[in-house]
Image: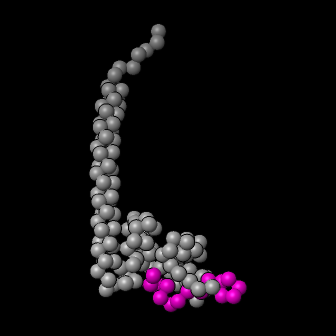
Amino acid sequence: MRIGELSKRTGASPRSLRYYEEQGLLTSSRSGAGQRHYSDDAVQRVSLIRRLFDAGMSSRVIATVLPCVDIPGDLGVAEETFAAMMRERDRIDADIAHLIETRDALDVLIAANSRHRAELTTEPVARST
């Protein structure tokens, strides 16, 4: 199938499909006129790639994980994929910790602002004479 049909079947834009190819996540053959042609398996592949992107993985991490799908019986590939997934999980944990610290700092600012607003509403208004 050509890129337009793959795009329609997967919901991925042609631009995204070309990007996936540039990153080595997806392959196609070329016609004599240079048009991309994809196998029917590409629909499932693109669906998986999109789920991995939706999970927050980068194209670099996805490229590390995909060989496990392509060569499921290879222990070395499975070990490499496991290590990549653990690194990704550790990165996400670090991001979560940073977000919690940021939220806590914001809570301090919100509390200070709330106190300040309360003080402003209880102060008498100075009259000019």
18, above or below 5, in the image: above
98, above or below 78, in the image: above
In the rendering, at what x and y percent does residue 67 appear? 39, 78
In the rendering, at what x and y percent does residue 116 appear? 33, 29
- Does the segment drawn in magenta span residue 32? yes
Q: Is residue 109 visible?
A: yes
Residue range in magenta is 31-45
Dividing the image into 4 quarters, which one contains the N terminus? bottom right
Residue at 33 percent across and 77 percent down: it is: 77
Q: Is residue 54 visible?
A: no
Q: How is the image coloured?
A: one colour
Residue at 29 percent across and 72 percent down: it is: 82
Q: Quadrant of residue 7?
A: bottom right
In the rendering, at what x and y percent does residue 128 appear? 46, 12
Q: Is residue 104 left or right of residue 69?
A: left
- Does the segment drawn in magenta span residue 66? no
Residue at 29 percent across and 37 percent down: it is: 108
Front-most of residues 49 and 12: 49
